[in-house]
Amino acid sequence: MSRDVLAEIDQTVKSHDIVLFMKGTKEWPQCGFSDRVVRILQEQETDFTDINVLEDPAIRQGIKDYTNWPTIPQLYVRGEFVGGCDIVTNLHLGGQLSGLLSPSTDG
């Protein structure tokens, strides 16, 4: 029985408002880039689901294939790929990240 990793990732991304695929956990990040994104999300007082790619090599590769994005961490908000550490940092510094993280009030 083969595992459909991309379907698992898609389900995870779509079933949580904010998901961070990272190295380590939000309590114990295992790389500087993951740590930076966790700190930014905590500063934004944002609750998020963390997926530790170090626990599952298939997810670690699969998330890169899912978005065709070569690096981890990867942040998803309401099913949409936001970006990695540099993009999240730039959005945070530019003041746009809080708007992306806030639940939409339209419609």
Image (cartoon, rainbow, N blue to C red):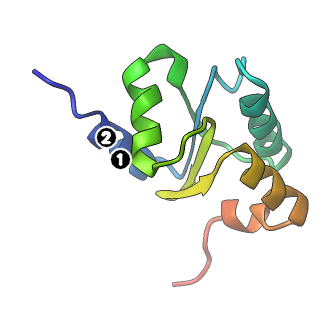
Q: Is residue 74 left or right of residue 13?
A: right
Residue that appears at 31% across and 40% down: 6
Compared to 31, does 87 lie above or below?
Answer: below
Q: Which residue is mark 1?
A: 10
Q: Could you say where residue 19 lies in the image, as x and y percent from the top left?
A: 55, 43
Quadrant including the N terminus = top left
Q: Which residue is mark 2?
A: 6
**Residue 20's image quarter?**
top right
Furthest residue in direction left, as rendered: 1
What is the secondary structure assignment of the residue under circle 1?
helix
Between residue 107 and residue 10, name the one nearer to us: 10
Name the amino acid, label 1. Answer: Asp
Residue that appears at 66% across and 46% down: 84
Q: Could you say where residue 107 lies in the image, as x and y percent from the top left?
A: 51, 84
Between residue 43 and residue 75, name the one nearer to us: 75
Residue that appears at 64% across and 22% down: 25
**Residue 81's image quarter?**
bottom right
